[in-house]
Image: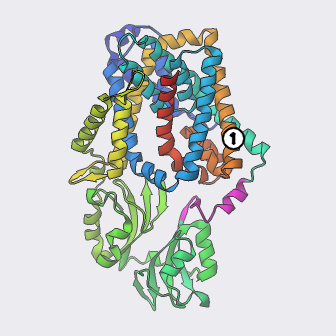
Amino acid sequence: MVQSFLESPLLLLFVVIGIGYALGNIAIKGAKLGVAAVLFVGLAFGALDPNLMVPDVIVTLGLSIFVYSIGISSGPSFFRTLAKRGARDISFSVVALFIFFILSVGAYYLLGLNKATAAGLLAGSVTSTPALAGVLDIVNTASPGKFDKTLFSNSAVIGYSLAYPMGVIGVMVAYSIFQKLFKVDLTQEQNDLQKEYPISMKIERTTIEITQPDIEALTIRELFNRYHKRLVFGRMSRNGIQSLPNMDTSLKLGDRIVVVGGGKLVDKAVKEMGRVPTDELTFDRRHYDVRKVFVSNPDLAGENIASLNLSENYSAIITRVQRGDSDMIARGTTVLELGDRVQMVVKRNDIDEINELFGNSYERLSQINLFSFGLGMALGLLIGKITFSFPGGVNFQLGYAGGPLLVALVLGAIRKTGPILWILPFSANLTLRQIGLILLLAGIGIKSGHTFKEVLLSSEGGLLFATGGVIVILATFISLIIGYKFFKIPFSLLSGMLANQPAILEFALDKTQNKLPAIGYTMVLPVTLILKILLVQLLFYLL
């Protein structure tokens, strides 16, 4: 078997990918390693023979594709987060990651580690594969003779691999201890944050008959604001005649109107507005129909719903937007992306024109614009080759990770330059990201496997594993205290903001039984992604 792998590196690569992906989907007490298991399977196969490896270009290709796809999708939210949420959320993220940074530096001096191992420990503690990739890129592109590239590359992977498991388990342990120690009331937090964050687990739809006198004469706009813009009002019926209301439509007693929103808010609207009639308006499809269409028209990417003027040009109202597995209430400010699936009420005569407007092509969403993708990647790689010189003779390159990531963030925020659409359809982006990540993880795992085995079997391996656990638990616990007590961030949001890995987020969601951790996770994800890469590289340069 080993001989077959030596003769065919591609066979080895895909065996590692297949087994790693299968193992990553096995849940142990509700936690999964996910695609990160490919790295550990790669280490196991690489340990079989020191000559087992895959071509370096495969690792570099995976790295560049992975960080570019992350950047292109995170660009809009990254700059939006910087502009709108900078004060509290970004400040806390910086403080939390610097705690991990300081403890990793302490481990470097206390244990006498080399700087590559310390950088790997930090990357593993925050479970950031892009950060590890950034360090490996620095090592591989360094000037010849500056240090032993093979030693440093293997050391970074070993530090990362030994710290990564505790980067998942340690955070969960810290969450459980903190919640019990500070007696966090998760139910009360959910009730307190109900108005500020859309934390309903399920979007529901019902028909309400207006029977309350104080609702009569109110406009849809007034009701929209009354329910904090978290309800959408669909078709209505007055005297047996159906129509689609606009924001200036006034309600009358006896009107029937379809309301879409979170279950608890819909129940509240029923009590305050009237009652649920025996017949549901949506069952009547003679004049209006409910349709789900894909956004595959590039001209709509980056446009908000209000700018489409659907109510003026067509008889249609968008009620919700599905992006990946997330269902969102449609608002005028909701920005559409390629791959979104919008649900709307539309007059039957306008269905064909609506399909043409949105594109509604699933096949088109699976395609990648190779011109914009190739051009963006090329720009990123060119930027990565530029050498920046600093006082003291220090030279710095963004490399294969930093260059594509920086360019992708900017292009993702721009979205379109003339006829060139930079962003990728949601499904295509996820596919590229996954391909890039598994190539990267499998390659670096196989390459470092033999050295990893030697360290793991030595006393140093156990010490590094324990060190990773101490860093993670201590840094997470201190960050929780600072966030909860000084930044006044609710624990439900904090648990998502500190969730460095999907398994941790799933643990937090299960513990809180609401979507607040997911909201916290998405609020800071773009910022923390960049900060992790920068801090790990900074640690490597400073030590």
The residue at the point 39 percent across, 21 percent down is 393
Left or right: residue 424 compared with residue 167 = left
Left or right: residue 159 compared with residue 358 = right
Is the residue 249 above or below the residue 129 in the image? below
The residue at the point 68 percent across, 32 percent down is 473
Is the residue 194 above or below the residue 513 in the image? below
Q: Quadrant of residue 458?
A: top right
The residue at the point 32 percent across, 31 percent down is 384
Coloring scheme used: rainbow
Is the residue 146 above or below the residue 31 in the image? above
In magenta, the rendered stretch is 186-203
**Does any portion of residue 62 appear in the rendered image?**
no
Q: Nearer the viewer, residue 410 or 360?
A: 410
Left or right: residue 30 compared with residue 204 = right
Q: Nearer the viewer, residue 119 or 7?
A: 119
Please tell me whether residue 225 belongs to the stretch shown in magenta: no
Q: Nearer the viewer, residue 489 or 198?
A: 489
Image x and y of residue 379, in percent: 26, 37
> Number of marks in the image?
1
Give the residue at mark 1. Answer: 175
Image x and y of residue 45, in percent: 46, 15
Q: Secondary structure at mark 1?
A: helix
Q: Quadrant of the N terminus?
A: top left
Image x and y of residue 218, in percent: 53, 86
Q: In the image, what residue type sits under mark 1?
A: Tyr
Is the residue 265 above or below the residue 485 in the image? below
Image x and y of residue 305, in percent: 38, 67
In the picture as drawn, the residue positioned furthest to the front comes out as 391
Neighbourhood count class around disc 1 (C-alpha, 10 Å): few under 14, some 14–19, many 20 upward: many
**Does any portion of residue 480 appear in the rendered image?**
yes
